[in-house]
Amino acid sequence: MLRERRLPSFDAFPPDPWSLAVVKPEPEMADDELGQTETMFALSNGYLGIRGTLDEGRPIHEPGTFLNGFYEYRPINYGEKAYGFPERGQSMLNCPDGLPIKLFVDGEAFDMAAADILAFERRLDFREGVLHRLLEWRTQTGKRFHLHTSRLVSFADRHLAAIEWELTLPEGGADVAIVSDFVERYPLPPVEGDPRIENGADENAIELLEARHAETRSTFLYRTRSSGFVLGCGMDHHLESDSDFAVGRDAESEALVFRSRCAGGTVKLRKYLAYHYGRADEEEVMLARVGATLDEARRTGFRAIRARQEIDMAAFWKRADVEVESSDSRLQQVIRWNLFQLFQASQRAEGHSIGVRGLTGRTYEGHYFWDTEIYVLPFLIYTAPEAARNVLHFRYRTLDNARERAAELGHRGAAFPWRTINGEEASAYYAAGTAQYHINADISYAIRKYVEVTGDEDFLHRHGAEILVETARLWRDLGFFSKRRDGRFCINGVTGPDEYNAVVDNNYFTNLMASENMAHAAEIVERMKVHAPEAYRDLVARTGLEAEEAAEWRQAAELMYLPYDERLQVHPQDDGFLDKEPWDFENTPEDHYPLLLHYHPLNLYRAQVIKQADTLLAMFLLGDRFTEGEKKRNFDYYDPITTHDSSLSVCIQSIVANEIGYRGKALDYFRFAAVMDLSDVGGNMKHGAHIASIGGTWMAMVYGFGGMRDYRGRISFHPALPDEWPAMQFCLRVRGQLLRIEIDHAETTYRLLEGESLMIWHVSDKVELTAAAPQTRRATPRPKDCDPPRASEAEVAYVPGA
């Protein structure tokens, strides 16, 4: 259900395919707009993230300097506690902020909130990976100054951020003071009425152990109260000017102060920031690493650091750009901002996963969810397979935590946490947390896709197979063969992706994905036993795998209960879904979406209303198990009752709509997904970018309009461009080779840019590619521009057996 009045446009920013800019000074913005720009201009490399706050530190909405995996424990408080409820959660910490650089001219402070700004632009350059700000300021005495700042978070050195600050003075000069600071930012207060933003850690989460100051450098050492981390951070500077500057410290804050009577010309200040964290016994090690990072930054210099940033960005765009020809001049800009967010969130996340908002904001406390495996990993698998491997390896590193959680819940195998930073469950609401067992199958699905696309058998044998074994064990233990259902394997008391229908029996998505998980685990174990006997013996030693287990998983998979309603010819989302009363959409006020903020969960659980794609998601992920007719009938039934109150929904609706011929609806849903953040569809961009939704945008382009399918290692294409797009091009990395796909309405050309040979399919036509011989195929039209019927009230209210 696409509520048209919520569908935004691309008209928010000056069109530029390679940058995003605002020309409205922040003081003229409402508080929410200010928060949106802080997210819009956030910089990150996957390890270090800094929100796009102003150089002077004010005005400010939500400051944020985050380190992936750096957290503090917090107690989880319950009105009524029960066995197995997690007792503590983890909250990503807001680290000390090294951005602030304050300017004083002739004793007058430059304050964006009060200054006479004559010209202003803030621009994020996608080619450079650099955030620029250019402004002209007139002082109260009539003097005009030009200020240009450039900021980056390095992709080459994940511990480093750097700023170039350049002030151009008028003739006659002025007395200039530049104050560079490192500011502690206490945890932000909770947002009332929004359960997605927790209280988090308190203001005593970290304590300062030591501060060291020498010349233009300051370094600091902190420790967390209970999570066992030490944080080393610091700043250093290099100043260039024709005028002599005195260097000192502020008596109270110990901020670094540069002072001079400048005759004119330009003053350049380069500021370098370093962040490292480690175990509690590594205090001196962290300080030493901070010092080494700052030493290397000063030796390298800002110009060379920026040049390396451009090289890294060029390599990214070569492999990951999606080029769309369109009459909408802003579409390419929106697409590239989205792709840039995926790069920022993942490039240097080694040793960790990717939070739902990356490192751009505090929503969900920096936790990792299933979002990463289902919505972000497809992009990484096809554009940055090493980054995908790192994310999956994080799950392997936390497998023991998942085993312990399964035992606590009374299960065999492993139960991966619904939300976590360190591998421990941090979800307090079990109905929409622990009950979402499908995360096990989501991780296993991602492992399968990664290995099939990359050919990385080493990861499968050393790490992936062990996860497959333990997740399959959980499913076999969780479900049972039901006599009432003729011996079919049933799974009760679970929650699927749709959190408006919680703790249900036989959620279709969960059952289908669990079946796939168990069947694949059995297949891999049996294959390893024959073709990789040494790796199989190691697997048996690590897991205690017994000879009969694979056969048990296969039996459960083959007998999995997958409900089907003969009258409607659709797959019920769960056993009780079709029995529920329809939600009264007609009398639901527009400002009551998302429903979760305005209605008690029980009201939602009793109704036929869906938060996000659930059964339809299964039909996309495992689409080779359904006919086009089945997909169409299910889409027609579920689409009108889906609110898309989750940002993860519309991208999936777009892909399925494209496949069944609802081309107009597919484009509408895509546009909705693409501008989820830049048009602030959910009203919460101020708290961070929707990284998984952005990954879904890439899927909507590649799987939707590009028509790619990758079932069981066979990669095929059946493109279906919107009429509004004359052409689209994108690249994919498949088994180490770089493939370029160029689509227009008449034909599709496949080019192997790197590698020797690759076999793909165009619709059902086998295409054998070599680097020397690109292949072109004529377009095979899909059905187009059908008007999807809405499910009638009688159908929505249908009660099986009535």
Image (tube, rainbow, N blue to C red):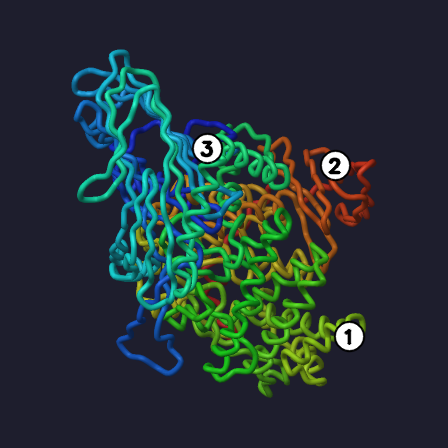
Determine whether the residue tagged by mark 2 lies in a helix, strand or loop.
strand
Label 1 is placed on what type of residue? Pro
In front here: 392 or 515? 392
Pointer 3: residues within 10 angstroms few (<14), some, or many (20+)?
Answer: many
Locate residue 238, reporting x and y percent: 38, 32
Inter-mark Cα distance, 1 to 3: 52 Å
Inter-mark Cα distance, 2 to 1: 42 Å
Pointer 1: residues within 10 angstroms few (<14), some, or many (20+)?
Answer: few
Give the residue pinned by disc 1. 533
Inter-mark Cα distance, 3 to 2: 42 Å
Q: Is residue 122 visible?
A: no
Pointer 2: residues within 10 angstroms few (<14), some, or many (20+)?
Answer: some
Label 2 is placed on what type of residue? Thr
Look at 45% across and 51% down and name the residue there: 289
Q: Of label 3 and label 2, which has the lower sequence position?
A: 3
Look at 31% across and 61% down and name the residue there: 200
Give the residue pinned by disc 3. 302
Q: Are marks 1 and 3 in contact (CB under 8 Å)?
A: no
Outermost bottom residue: 483
Look at 20% across and 20% down and name the residue there: 139
Outermost top residue: 171
Q: Of label 2 and label 1, which has the lower sequence position?
A: 1
